[in-house]
Each structure stands twice: as structure tokens, then as C-alpha cells.
Image: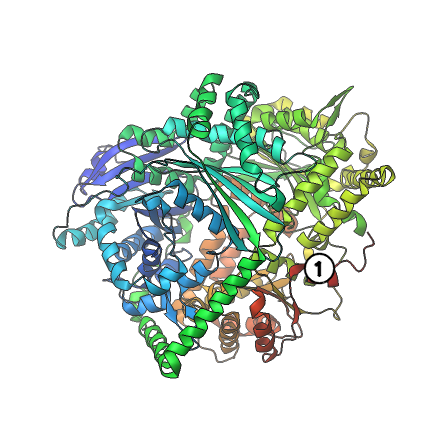
């Protein structure tokens, strides 16, 4: 923030009616200033985050004492027009014009937050007062309530965007167990027990627009509004743009006395509770257990709250932590994962989650857990203070990582916590500077930590919720829903149903009244040239120019270096799996998890896996393996799936340790039968949870249709891995077959880790490295050489584009629908051949075409989300796969959603199509923002730089793409649509997967048959797997 010479940081706001409350630095890195309006009570928090984007988080404390979902329904209705802009869609279209990609919001139990992100500050400042008008002065019409919250269709079914969203999550196992936990931990009259998203029965029968208006009046007031703004924006410009809006607030006259939310005392948890909660499932194999306690206060015990976070991390974060060691890393595991969470309430909630618990062990978790905690308190299982200090130090490094790689959200979450529960300047400073608390925690003795466990976990009442998978519950819910809908249809009759349909159509018509054209152009399109980008320099082992501190010309492996302003060193070891046989690919998931949790041969000493895990935790900030680039969950490949990756993040003074760990993890781990058995069991136990995720299963099924049997996509899919690893466990019971398993795993190492198949991508501030650090690279390979590292010519990166791995079998079925009892919504994925080159001349106009159709308040938004057919949708090209995707997420009526999408696409394929100029400009500016947003933080820039080598594009690719988008004309689009969108609509070309409740599969089959699709129906994902996946692989 720059100041004129005769101004000070607190004199600037005064002339605009604001008072500087305090200034601080978030973890001593990012300046943060808090202001308050003396006229209206609005709070402004400015965080001086570097980079190309400006973020706004406009937060209000919101409290509810029922399940009507008033905070959530209000959040949705805010976007449907305001006093000064009384038309639905104006806000998001203006946001797009201001170089954002629409607006967004979230509802939490204790607050609601409205967000916007723009490229540069010019568009942000233009949009901010318009957004605030929607927040404080929304229309809240009955028509908006009907379409956005809940309505009844002409068929007697339930619709509405909010209803659709909650239908997709209410009866999932995780949602049921989590809600029951909060209800029991917060007994009595307490807002923390409420489902602020809204329960479906309440949305149908209790929630009204009048209740929402009353709720808005109580909580949406300037005194309760905190504007958190992060990025390169001048404080004076913010206050200047707020002045007319504040004048409007003051012109409204006096308001009722404001009572700050969440100030009432929270009723105590008097006794322990143990409950069983059934949830819908197709197979009654694995369930879940949540165990929670009331933790320290987020108002008065912040230091203890931070200490609890560290303590729970110590108990759970690695395979050698006390809880995973007892529950997970054993031959007969109690679960696949133990994790912790803390909900920062005035009386906080701390809890452990035990995932994928075998059904016969659900009743054993509590006693074993409480016994372990008691053993720690009684000294039978003493706290390892050295490891605890390691956890604290790593947590410090992680905090610095978060503020480097996600600075906008870091500042916002700290400021929101202060808005809700802070009372003094010191409170905000404490929240902004957790590093200082972590340094202090390093000095705390063992007794301090033991007392924390005693006070909050052992002596305090607890709540245990056991989630039990139940086919019977699935049947009951389906039966109850069918009977409810049938009773409604009977009660309403034809005439009543016609009235409901008419109401819906009338409401839609009212909502879609077009705004005057001048309203949609009332803000200027920002100048892109004023945007501040992060700087980066890149070079490789072959570059003529090298960094003076870090010359990698003679490195033993091929290096790609990014010199960037960062506090860390990121090491990506990229290994090409192209040479692996089809059989070996099935071992990849197991292999990469094993090398992180196996013993190491260090000279004459064999380091145990427990010591390896502990030392790796101490020496690194992060360590992970991936199949494909970017983070991907288990059973899923990232893009460029034939490249596998070991990623280490270290502090600069531990660069040598990072190099040592690369060598040891890749070349010197010892793969033992015990570790293979335990890791394979962990992966298998994770299947049950993944199988309940409709969206994941739809994507997995489509990958199975798209990719060949020789691809990693195919071999590491969830269902194939389950069957393969089950067979591996059987083989481990035979000494001869065990040798074969280990031999196969070692063959993967020999192939992947040969220097010709390895490239290291490194991102660091090379100026901060020592000149001697480059000599440490000679230690990256073993000495004497491992069989996998015999000398050879160093190769630069070998890239296998995913489109080269596509299935060429045109005789295989193209369209599948799978029934899953754990889901109530529809999930649909489609893919058709598309662009294969990231530098293709058609890519920019295709992106604009798709953005025009899919943008907020664009054609698809209005006809698909606006009519309640689906919660969200997407159309995106993936040149690495050579595919164009169309997806629907949490659809209530997938046939209607697809039909609307098809009609919209077809209507824009005609040569004489008229392209709305405002929507066209909006599509281009919002798309430009999305591309710039790819480089919003240091971590993003590093990721984008790595991708350039795979995309075969220069490092300024995103900037060049922006310029290409600017040059796209509407006249370019018709030909592009014919070329790439027509195949997407052709049942003979496109491939489709749909996941839905089993009772809906026949409806999908018959409805899509009328559209020319010949679907194959499977009653469960396993039936699809058994019939199509393992014909070729003898186990």
C-alpha cells in the first residue's frame, strides 16, 4: 500500500470515515490492516498479498437454531438481484465483465461468506459496491424462492437448487455421522447443532421466504459485515468506492440494536454418548466411527486450541503415530485411516475419524481408543517429546507453505475467526501469527501435553457415533421416498400438479426478465496490462545460461530448474512408466505407497520403517508420490498418467537431506512381506468409502471406457485394484509366491529408476542456495550403482500424452449406467474426441465457445441449474487426453439436464446464430481471469511451469493464450462448434457413464434410448468390473 509523503497509514482512512483498528503481519510475512467505519460499523481487513489477483471475502456471522437452512437458502437468494440492480444474473455477468469468473459463497455453521476474485484491482473496485448492494439489499422475491430453494414439479417431484444440493449429501454416511456427532456434542439450545444447509423435509415443509426475509433483517447488517480484501489494492481506493454505498446505508435511517451472534453461553456436555447411525450402502462391509469431545474455547483459549491441533496431529499424522500404529499399520487393521479435525467454535469440537472400519470391528474402536489415551496419561505409553517437537516444527513449515501457496484464503480464515470470536487487537495478532505460538509450544514440557489429553480427552465426556452400512436402510429410504411422492401425486391430482408446474414456469419467467442492456455494461472492462504477475526464470541441464549459484550442466540426472521467490525447495522426481509391462502396472499404487513406508539399507545399517517415517517427517515439509502430475486421490491418475512422481518439499538448509531422501527412497528401500501386507490392506480398506462417492465412480467408469488396458488409468482404477490386491494378499501366504510379488515390485524399481527414465524438476530461490549445494547432486544416485542406475546418456523429459493411451476398440460398449444405493442424485460424465495440442489454433476459440455456454448466468446456467435439473455442470477440453468432456454433478433430473444442454448446444451450431455481445464479452473476460488465476500463488506458478514441459509450450504460455482469447471474434465460433461440439452429441462417437440410485437405472435406460443412446445397465460398480475388467488378466 503506497502513501503520499504527507499521509500516514491511519490518516488515509479518516477522511473517508474509517478508523484504523490495528496493523500486523501474518506470520511476519504479509502486512494486514483492520479498519472500522465510524458511520456504519462495516469492518474492512486488507491483506497485502502479492500476485495477479485480488480476492474479496465478505463475511457475516450467522446463527440458526433449527434445520430450516435459513443461512444457506439466503446465501443462494442473495444472487438473484438487489435494490439497485433488480434483475437475476446481473451480478455474475458484471463480475465476468470485471475479469472475474462470476461470484461464489459458502455457508458454515457460524458464518456465511460471499467471495469474488478478479485479475487485478480495477475490476474488483468496480464490482465491490454492486456485490454489497446484493448482500445488504437483496430482492428476496417469492419467485426466486420457488426456483432456487424448493418447488414441486408437474410430475410431483421436488426441485430447486438448494434442495438438489442437499439431496446429494444429506443421506451419505459421512453427512449422517457428522451431523449426529454435532447434535450430541452440543445438547440443549445451541446453534452449533443445526444443519444450516437445510434438511430436505424442512426445505419442503417448514422453510418459507418470509422466514428468510426475517433472518436477513436480523443478521445482514453493516455492523455484522466484515470485508476481507487480499491482493494488490490501494486502501484509499477501497474506501473511496465504499463511500457512496455507506451513504446509502446511512440514508436508510436508524436500525434496531445489533446483538452480536454467538455470544450466548454454550450448554455443557454432561455425559458421554454412544450411538449407532445406519446409512445407505450397497455392501455391508466397512463403516466409520467418529469420536468427539468439547475442546478449548476459540474465544479465550487460542493457545490451547493451537496446542490441541499439534497434539492431534502427533497422534495421527504418520504411520508411526500412536493411533495409526495401533489401528491401521497392523496385519489385521481396524480401519484404513485415522484422521482428526477441529471445529473452531466458542466451545470447540475436536474429534477423530476412523474410516473404512470392518463391520465386525465397529464396536471395538471406542474401548481401544480410550484405553490408548489412558495409557498415555498414566505413562504406560509415554509421549515421545522428540517426535512431538518434530511435529511442531513441521507444522510451522506447513503454516509458511500455506501462506505462500494459498495466501488469500489463509488471511481470510484468520480474519473470519477474529470476526466471530475475537474481542481485542491482541486476538487478531494472535490469530495472524500462529508461528509465534508454535515456537512457544516447542518449549512446553511433557506434563503440559499429558494434561491436555487428560483435560480434554480422558476426563471429559465423549461422543461416539458409529456409522453402520445398511442395505436395509437403503431400501427403507427408497420405499419411503416412493410412498411420499405417490401420496403427494394422489393428493394434488392432475389439477394440483398442473398448478405446481404453472407456478414454476411463472416463477422462472419472472426471474428471467432481462435487464436493460446499459445495466450490463455499466462497469468498464479492466485493462489487463496493469496486472502484477509472479516472476520466474527457468533453465535445464542443457541450457547455455545457468544460475550462478546452481549450475546443473554436469548433474547425474537431467534437471529442470525454476528460480522463483519462495521460502522452500520443491523437488519433483519424474519417472517414465512407459516401459512397464501391463502386468506390472497393477503394482504401481502398491509400490509407491510402499517406498514411503519401508525399511532402508543405509550402509551397513538397516533403518526400520518406523525410523524412516519419523526421519522423513523431520527432514521434509511434505513428501508424497503420484501417478500422473498434480495431486490425485488414491485410485486416480493425474494428467500425463504415464509419468510417475516422487515429490519432496524441504527448507533450503535441508536441501542435502532432500537429495539423500530421493536416493534412499528410490534405490535403497527394502520391500518386505510384512510391509507389503499392511500397505495392501490399507489400500483395500479404502475402497468401501470411495465406492460411495457417486462422482468419483462416474469418472472411474468413464476412464474404464476410454483408456486401454495398457494404461495406468486402467490398472489403478478402484475396482481393479481391489481385486488385484486381494489376490496379492493371498499370494503372500505362500513363500514362493511372496518372492514373485517382491520380484515384480523390484522390477518396477529397476525400470522406473533407471537414469534414462528419470528427470528432476526443482523449484527454489536459487539466490538463497549455497554454491556448494549443487555439488550435493552427485549423491542423488547410489554408489556403487544400483542395477537400476547403470550409467547412460541423460535424457530430457519423455512425455506420453494421455490421448496415446485411448482405447481403440470400437466394439466395446460406449454407454453404461450403474446403480449405487449410497447416492440419491445423478452423476454423469461424457467424453468425445477433441483437440490434442495445447498450442492448437482452435483451442482459444473453443474455450470461448464453451465459456459462453457455461458461464454463470449464461445459457446453461439458466436452463440447467436455474431450473433445478442439476447442482452443477461443466464442459471442458483436455488436450492431454484429446477429449472434450460434458459432466453433470448432483443432478435431480439427469435426462432433463442433458436434454437442455443438447438443445442449447445445437441452437448455437447454426451459421446464423446470434451471439449476445454482452455475454460474449463476459465469456472472454471471465475466461481470461480463469487463465490468470492459474498463477495466483507461488505454488501455482511452480505447477504451471512444470506443466509447460509436458504441454510442449513456452513458459509464457498462459499470457500468450490470454492474448489469443482477446483476439477471438464471435464470427469464429460457429465453425468451431461444428467441428468439436457435434461429435459430443453423437451417441455413436461419445462415451457416457452415469451413476444413480438403483431404482433410477431403468428410467435412465428408457429415456436415453429415445435420444439414441444404447446404455448397458449394471446393478452395482462391481458387476461392471467383473464383466468388463479382468478378462485378460489371470490372477
Relative depth, front residue between 743 and 996:
996
Camera-nearest residue between 918 and 304: 304
Residue occupying image coordinates x 53% and y 36%: 366
Measured as percent of width and height from the top left, residue 98 is found at 37, 57
Compared across the picture, whether 92 is left or right of 955 comes to left
Residue drawn at x 64%, y 62% as measured from the top left: 1020
Q: Residues within 10 Å of mark 1 (few under 14, many from 20)?
A: some
Dot 1 corresponds to which residue? 1025
Per the image, label 1 sits on a secondary structure element best described as helix
Vertical comparison of 704 with 40: above or below: below
Instruction: Indicate the position of residue 629 as horizontal and vertical percent values.
Output: 63, 46
Looking at the image, which residue is at 68% across and 25% down? 776
31 in relation to 450, above or below: below
| 338 sits to left or right of 94 | right
Tell me if 665 is positioned left or right of 26 in this view: right
> Which corner quadrant of the image does residue 813 belong to?
bottom right
Amino acid at each position: 500500500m503506497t502513501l503520499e509523503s504527507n499521509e500516514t497509514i491511519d490518516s488515509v482512512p479518516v477522511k473517508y470515515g474509517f478508523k484504523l483498528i490495528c496493523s500486523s503481519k501474518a506470520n511476519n510475512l504479509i502486512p494486514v490492516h483492520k479498519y472500522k467505519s465510524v458511520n456504519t460499523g462495516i469492518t474492512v481487513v486488507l491483506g497485502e498479498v502479492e500476485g495477479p489477483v485480488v480476492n474479496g471475502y465478505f463475511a457475516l456471522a450467522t446463527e440458526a437454531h433449527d434445520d430450516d437452512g435459513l443461512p444457506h437458502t439466503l446465501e443462494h437468494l442473495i444472487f438473484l438481484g438487489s435494490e439497485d440492480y433488480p434483475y437475476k444474473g446481473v451480478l455474475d455477468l458484471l463480475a465476468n465483465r470485471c475479469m472475474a469468473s462470476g461470484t461464489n459463497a459458502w455457508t458454515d455453521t457460524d458464518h456465511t461468506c460471499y467471495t469474488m476474485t478478479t485479475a487485478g484491482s480495477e475490476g474488483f473496485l468496480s464490482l465491490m459496491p454492486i456485490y454489497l448492494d446484493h448482500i445488504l439489499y437483496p430482492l428476496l422475491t417469492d419467485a426466486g424462492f420457488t426456483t432456487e430453494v424448493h418447488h414441486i414439479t408437474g410430475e410431483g417431484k421436488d426441485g430447486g437448487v438448494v434442495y438438489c444440493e442437499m439431496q446429494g449429501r444429506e443421506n451419505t454416511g459421512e453427512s449422517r455421522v457428522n451431523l449426529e456427532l454435532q447434535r450430541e456434542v452440543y445438547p440443549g439450545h445451541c446453534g452449533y447443532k443445526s444443519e444450516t444447509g437445510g434438511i430436505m423435509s424442512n426445505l419442503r415443509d417448514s422453510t418459507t421466504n418470509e422466514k428468510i426475509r426475517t433472518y436477513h433483517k436480523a443478521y445482514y447488517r453493516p455492523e455484522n459485515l466484515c470485508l476481507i480484501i487480499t491482493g494488490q489494492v490501494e486502501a484509499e481506493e477501497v474506501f473511496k468506492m465504499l463511500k457512496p454505498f455507506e451513504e446509502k446505508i446511512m440514508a436508510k435511517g436508524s436500525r434496531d440494536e445489533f446483538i452480536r451472534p454467538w455470544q450466548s453461553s454454550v450448554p455443557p456436555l454432561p455425559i458421554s454418548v454412544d450411538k449407532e447411525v445406519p446409512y445407505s450402502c450397497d455392501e455391508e462391509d466397512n463403516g466409520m466411527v467418529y469420536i468427539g469431545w468439547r475442546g478449548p474455547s476459540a474465544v479465550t483459549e487460542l493457545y490451547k486450541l493451537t496446542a490441541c491441533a499439534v497434539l492431534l496431529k502427533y497422534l495421527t499424522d504418520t504411520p508411526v503415530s500412536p493411533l495409526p500404529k495401533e489401528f491401521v499399520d497392523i496385519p489385521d487393521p481396524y480401519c484404513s485411516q485415522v484422521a482428526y479435525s477441529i471445529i473452531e467454535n466458542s466451545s470447540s469440537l475436536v474429534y477423530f475419524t476412523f474410516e473404512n472400519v470392518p463391520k465386525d470391528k465397529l464396536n471395538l474402536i471406542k474401548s481401544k481408543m480410550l484405553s490408548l489415551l489412558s495409557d498415555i496419561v498414566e505413562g504406560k505409553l509415554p509421549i515421545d517429546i522428540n517426535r512431538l517437537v518434530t511435529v511442531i516444527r513441521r507444522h510451522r513449515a506447513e503454516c509458511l507453505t500455506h501462506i505462500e501457496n494459498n495466501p488469500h484464503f489463509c488471511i481470510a480464515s484468520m480474519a473470519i475467526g477474529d470476526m466471530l470470536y475475537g474481542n481485542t487487537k491482541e486476538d487478531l495478532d494472535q490469530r495472524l501469527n500462529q508461528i509465534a505460538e508454535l515456537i512457544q509450544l516447542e518449549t512446553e514440557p511433557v506434563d503440559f501435553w499429558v494434561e491436555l489429553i487428560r483435560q480434554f480427552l480422558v476426563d471429559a465426556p465423549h461422543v461416539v457415533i458409529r456409522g453402520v452400512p445398511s442395505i436395509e436402510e437403503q431400501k427403507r429410504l427408497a420405499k419411503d421416498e416412493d410412498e411420499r411422492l405417490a401420496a403427494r401425486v394422489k393428493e394434488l391430482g392432475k389439477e394440483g400438479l398442473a398448478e405446481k408446474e404453472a407456478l414454476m414456469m411463472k416463477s422462472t419467467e419472472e426471474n428471467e426478465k432481462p435487464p436493460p442492456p446499459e445495466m450490463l455494461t455499466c462497469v468498464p472492462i479492466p485493462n489487463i496490462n496493469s496486472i502484477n504477475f509472479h516472476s520466474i526464470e527457468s533453465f535445464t541441464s542443457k541450457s547455455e545460461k545457468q544460475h550462478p549459484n546452481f549450475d546443473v550442466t554436469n548433474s547425474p540426472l537431467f534437471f529442470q530448474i525454476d528460480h522463483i521467490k519462495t521460502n522452500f525447495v520443491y523437488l519433483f522426481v519424474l519417472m517414465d512408466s512407459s516401459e512397464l509391462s501391463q502386468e506390472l502396472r497393477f503394482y504401481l499404487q502398491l509400490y509407491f505407497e510402499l517406498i514411503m513406508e519401508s525399511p532402508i539399507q543405509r550402509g551397513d545399517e538397516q533403518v526400520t520403517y518406523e525410523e524412516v517415517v519419523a526421519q522423513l517427517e523431520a527432514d521434509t515439509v511434505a513428501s508424497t508420490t503420484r501417478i500422473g502430475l498434480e495431486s490425485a486421490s488414491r485410485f486416480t491418475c493425474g494428467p500425463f498418467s504415464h509419468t510417475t512422481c516422487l515429490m519432496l518439499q524441504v527448507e533450503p538448509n535441508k536441501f542435502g537431506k532432500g537429495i539423500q531422501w530421493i536416493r534412499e527412497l528410490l534405490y535403497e528401500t527394502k520391500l518386505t512381506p510384512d510391509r507389503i501386507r499392511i500397505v495392501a490392506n490399507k489400500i483395500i480398506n479404502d475402497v468401501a468409502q470411495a465406492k460411495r462417492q457417486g462422482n468419483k465412480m462416474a469418472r472411474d467408469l468413464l476412464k474404464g471406457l476410454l483408456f486401454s488396458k495398457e494404461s495406468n488409468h486402467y490398472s489403478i482404477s478402484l475396482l481393479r485394484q481391489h481385486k488385484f490386491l486381494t489376490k496379492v494378499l493371498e499370494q503372500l501366504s505362500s513363500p514362493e509366491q511372496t518372492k514373485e510379488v517382491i520380484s515384480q515390485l523390484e522390477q518396477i524399481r529397476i525400470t522406473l529408476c533407471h537414469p534414462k527414465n528419470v528427470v528432476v524438476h526443482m523449484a527454489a530461490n536459487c539466490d538463497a542456495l549455497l554454491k556448494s549445494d549443487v555439488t550435493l547432486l552427485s549423491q542423488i544416485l547410489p554408489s556403487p550403482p544400483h542395477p537400476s542406475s547403470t550409467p547412460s546418456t541423460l535424457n530430457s523429459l519423455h512425455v506420453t500424452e494421455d490421448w496415446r493411451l485411448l482405447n481403440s476398440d470400437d466394439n466395446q460398449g460406449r454407454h453404461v449406467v450403474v446403480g449405487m444405493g449410497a447416492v440419491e442424485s445423478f452423476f454423469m460424465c461424457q467424453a468425445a474426441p477433441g483437440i490434442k495440442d495445447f498450442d492448437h489454433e482452435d483451442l482459444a476459440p473453443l474455450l470461448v465457445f464453451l465459456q459462453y455456454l457455461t458461464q454463470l448466468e449464461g445459457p446453461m446456467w439458466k436452463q440447467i441449474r436455474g431450473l433445478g435439473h442439476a447442482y452443477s455442470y461443466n464442459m471442458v477440453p483436455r488436450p492431454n487426453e484429446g477429449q472434450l468432456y460434458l459432466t453433470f454433478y448432483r443432478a435431480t433430473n439427469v435426462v432433463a439436464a442433458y436434454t437442455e444442454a443438447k438443445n442449447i448446444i445445437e441452437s448455437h451450431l447454426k451459421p446464423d446464430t446470434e451471439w449476445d455481445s454482452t455475454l460474449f464479452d463476459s465469456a472472454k473476460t471471465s475466461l481470461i481471469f480463469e487463465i490468470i488465476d492459474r498463477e495466483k500463488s507461488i505454488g501455482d506458478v511452480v505447477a504451471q511451469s512444470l506443466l509447460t514441459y509436458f504441454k510442449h509450450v513456452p513458459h509464457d504460455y498462459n499470457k500468450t493464450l490470454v492474448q489469443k482469447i482477446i483476439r477471438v471474434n464471435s464470427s469464429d465460433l460457429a465453425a468451431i462448434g461444428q467441428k468439436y461440439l457435434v461429435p459430443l452429441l453423437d451417441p455413436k462417437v461419445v462415451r457416457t457413464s452415469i451413476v444413480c440410485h438403483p431404482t433410477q437405472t431403468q428410467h435412465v435406460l428408457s429415456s436415453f434410448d429415445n435420444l439414441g443412446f444404447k446404455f448397458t445397465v449394471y446393478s452395482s460398480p462391481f458387476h461392471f468390473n467383473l464383466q468388463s475388467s479382468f478378462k485378460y488378466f489371470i490372477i
